[in-house]
Image (cartoon, rainbow, N blue to C red):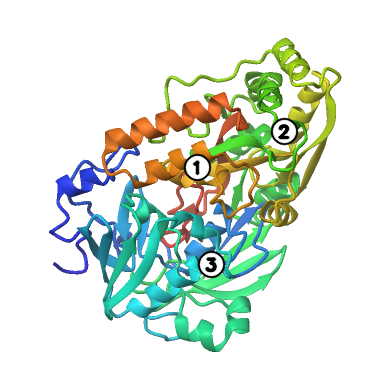
Amino acid sequence: MDDHNLLNSTLTRRRVLQYGLLAAAGWSALGLLEACAPGSSSTSAPTGGTLIFGEGTGPTVLDPLGPGGSTPLLGYWRQMYDSLVWYENGQVVPQLATSWKNVDDLTWEFKLRTGVKFHNGEAFDANAVKFTLDRILDPKQKATQASRFTALKSVEVVDPQTVRMHTTTPFPVLLLGLTQAFIVPPQYITQSPDKALTSPVGTGPFKFDSWQQGSQLTYVANTEYWGGRPKLDKLVFRVIADDAARLAALKAGEIHIDMNLPLDAIDAVASDPNLTVEKAFIDNSLILEMDTLHGGPMANPKVRMAINYAIDKDGINKTLLSNKLRPLAGQLLTEDAFGWNPNVKQVPYDPNMAKQLLTQAGYPNGFDTQVNGPIGKYTSDRDIVIAVADQLNKVGIRAAANPMEYGLFIQKLISNQLGPMFLVGWFSFGDPALAEIWLTSKSTLGHYYQDATYDQLVAQGASQLDTKQRQATYYQAAQYMHDQAMAAWLFQAATYYGVSKKVTGFSPRNDELPFFYPAAIRS
């Protein structure tokens, strides 16, 4: 089969169904998933120009396979790197892999795209795939993506255009994990490791140009991209942490897109003749995670449940968030994700119950604590942190609100310093295995909770091939995390973008990973 076929003919519809890849996550019910080739975008759209994307956070390092590579950073890397496969419109589609099959339950084989080169001229081949995944699995690398490959044992180079991946157990979510494994050039990194950290090289549609940490990251078009030249000449990610300043830059035409538009500005932006508002409910659950590993009140499940009862999710959504978000149903997963349990319900607002539970836990007079959180990452994140702290104070938990700059937040997150509790959002990308891992002992983005029963449920679900069995396992996991009050379940996040009408080809994604290869600017 040629390079435009997504699946090898030996991977039948029955086999795909067996691996759970067409389950309730909304994947196609066809045995063959048609690829959206990168070069297929309309040629009638304007070309050239510079697009400036404004957001509240930026990268602190330029290593796509390093520590602290949280989901927001994937959007930066996506412009510059390719992965073997990508997730698009509910389907896994080819990128640097053109087809794949399961040789057996523990072996995946991938055929690779030919003629692809890294930005420095180095050839892409099977050795680059093995180098990348070996790097992710190396504990010294501390790659965030390692949590996506808990069952990956080894990568075998069959020939320059073929790799096999061997797993310790059946691993139906391998493909989703591979969407975040950005392929890096082995020769360049081996020969110039320091340079690779300051001048990164990928195979993607844009090439690295410059970086001013905390200010902006600039790319230029890769005119020799295997999928065809991008329409833009230059792409700039500009960091403006303050919501009001970012909005002012949008109105002044200094940026073309404002990510995380302030909720109270949505109507004004929508009525501006030069702007439009785009939104997406995303597969991201905002929770109040708690450090249970260092003793104190958070180690007591009654205290954790009291915190759930103390927070008026509906009230915050109505008065502070203009009903723009969705309260979570007492569990980590969002309602549209595979494994979401309809029998688990939202914890109601009941301050009296919160006080009773605190008394039962041995804290009749409350206790002193702190609520940490990022600034500029999630919609109204600073305001949510302050509102949650205020409501905890009303039941006797003397909580100080401590919102902080996002780079500091990530640094503290991965070094286990965000306790006793903090606001964070975990993405599922439609499958529970990719979200629930962060509350297990396998987390590579901080370790704040450990429960052998929960670990076992998450590992079991990630290795089951039968869709109904997987769903039953994740239903059980959802009920267990609810009963243990593993976190305070707050909101399904939504992202609102203010967009200049000069921009074409931009569509918000439910994984919050903007991709500007098809974008263009009208003159």
Give how far apart the Cα atoms at labels 2 and 3 are: 32 Å
Identified by mark 2, the residue type is Met
Identified by mark 3, the residue type is Leu
Quadrant housing the N terminus: bottom left
**Residue 200, x across and y down, in percent:** 55, 76
- Which badge, 2 or 3, is on the more N-terminal residue? 3
Residue 452, can we see it? yes
Name the residue carrying label 2.
298
Q: Is residue 367 left or right of residue 491?
A: right
As displayed, is residue 239 above or below residue 372? below
Tell me which corner region of the image, top left, top right, bottom left or bottom right, holds residue 96: bottom left
| Pointer 3 local density, CA inside 10 Å: few below 14, some 14–19, many at least 20 | many
Q: Residue at x 62, y 33 (%)?
A: 487
* Closer to us: 57 or 158: 158
Q: Residue at x 56, y 42 (%)?
A: 439
Q: Nearer the viewer, mark 3 or mark 1?
A: 1
Name the residue carrying label 3.
65
Residue furthest bottom as drawn: 191
As displayed, is residue 510 above or below residue 232? above
**Residue 91, x across and y down, in percent:** 31, 48
- Which badge, 2 or 1, is on the more N-terminal residue? 2
Name the residue carrying label 1.
455
Identified by mark 1, the residue type is Asp
* Closer to us: 129 or 359: 359
